[in-house]
Image (cartoon, helix red, strand yellow):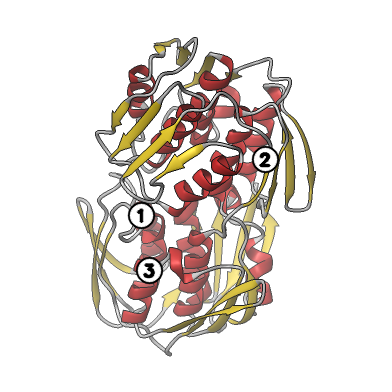
Amino acid sequence: MDKLIITGGVRLTGEVAISGAKNAALPILCAALLTKEPLTLSNVPALNDIGTMLKLLAQMGVKMEREGDRVTLDASDLHNPVAPYELVKTMRASILVLGPLVARCGEAKVSLPGGCAIGARPVDQHIKGLTAMGAEVTVEHGYVHARATRLKGARLFTDMVTVTGTENLMMAACLGAGETVIENAAREPEVVDLAQCLNAMGARIAGAGTDVIRIQGVDALHGATHRIMPDRIETGTFLCAAAATGGEVRLTGTSAGYLDAVVDKLMDAGCEITSEKLPGIETLMIQAPARLKAVSIRTAPYPAFPTDMQAQFMAINAVAEGTAVMRETIFENRFMHAVELIRLGADIRIDGNTAFVTGRPALQGATVMATDLRASASLVIAGLVAEGETHIERIYHLDRGYEHIERKLTVLGANIRREKA
């Protein structure tokens, strides 16, 4: 098992490219299940979760070719509409095959994802929506088994805003009979990216990016090409790393448009952030002060402050001037990184879903353990500013969502290396 070793105290400077978005690529890969024709995707990041999804699709009969960041999927011979526990247990996004399989094959057997370190992520909204569309759904022996001759259009109202639920039901509705309306839909940019890909495949989707999405079902979808959007969470993470180190960094291939809440908070902390559109490329530039000001946040569904950036902001608040109040409203167990940050010398007090973080002039290097994907990123940021060496163990979490993060940080001047633990 690998670990990262970081010697802190280096100011990040330079330019680095942002990869494609994991949370957009995963559902779009599943969209290939909806057509017999090839779907070609570019800007697909090289991540462990992407590899897991490709393995899952391959065992269903999907043929694929991969060259660099380009993947072509051919689901013309889809003969095994099953998502086994052995693959699903490593990645909750596997549930995204449920809707497309029922819509295309008339049947799906998908393992329940099981536990999640950061809190409950129930799939009941997925099941409720498919049932309303005419599917017969049972849960037996740890598997969701859904059948339908053809799904039918329906009015769907999700009891909670769910990104994967919205995506699953939107994909399922594309091949349904009649109109489906999803109310209380997730508004995330990744949902919009999926809708754009589906529309390129011949779907008829309107309203993506709002809380009401309308889908007119069609008889079949066709092949298409689509470029995955840039990863807004990777973008935010590198902005926070630059901010924490007092750096000056240019990020290419990304946009501030997906990150208004994060950019606003970084500017409140004292950073200057500008964007520039050049021919064929967008860039985002951050210039940070010698020491940041503490900023309070409250996570909420898009377009509010994203829960996936909470841990990174806890790391920068740990070395900022003042005290920040951080409220987590999405997941009930997403402060596990706080204990590890405290090992590095951070002053953090937890009270329920609220963290009180008082910045210190410096942190001290120590051995810490990653507990989930974004917690890993917060420890990297803390390690970049800590005095001495920080050893981060269990970084397989990090490899699920950040493409070659140590290489990119090295380009920016960080003293970071990967070793076998």
Q: Secondary structure at mark 2?
A: helix
Residue 410 shows which numbered tag? Answer: none
Which residue position is annotated with label 2? 51
The residue positioned 48% from the left and 11% from the top of the image is: 147
Residue 403, by quadrant, is bottom right
Q: Earlier in the sequence, mark 2 or mark 3?
A: 2
Query: Which residue type carries mark 2?
Result: Gly
Question: As drawn, is 190 to the left or to the right of 406?
Answer: left
Q: Is residue 373 above or below residue 149?
A: below
Nearer to me, 234 or 275:
275
Label 2, label 3: how far apart the Cα atoms are: 30 Å
Above or below: residue 368 compared with residue 193: below
If you read the primary sequence from the N terminus, does the residue marked by circle 2 or circle 1 appear first? Answer: 2
Task: State the image coordinates of residue 174 (x, y, percent, origin top left).
Answer: 49, 30
Q: Which is nearer the eye, 306 or 335? A: 306
Residue bearing mark 3: 260
Mark 1: which secondary structure?
helix
Say which of marks 1 and 3 sits in front: 3
Q: Is residue 129 left or right of residue 41?
A: left
Pointer 1 local density, CA inside 10 Å: few below 14, some 14–19, many at least 20: many
Amino acid beneath label 1? Thr
**Residue wearing tag 1:** 307
In three-dimensional space, the C-alpha distance between marks 2 and 1, rounded to whole angstroms, equals 24 Å
Q: Is residue 366 visible?
A: no
Q: Circle 3 — which element? A: helix
Please indicate, yes or no, whether residue 335 appears anywhere in the rendered image. Answer: yes
Residue type, label 3? Asp
How crowded pointer 2 is (Cα within 10 Å; few <14, some 14-19, many 20+) is rated as some
Picture layout, residue 372 above or below residue 95: below
**Which circle, 2 or 3, is nearer the viewer?**
3
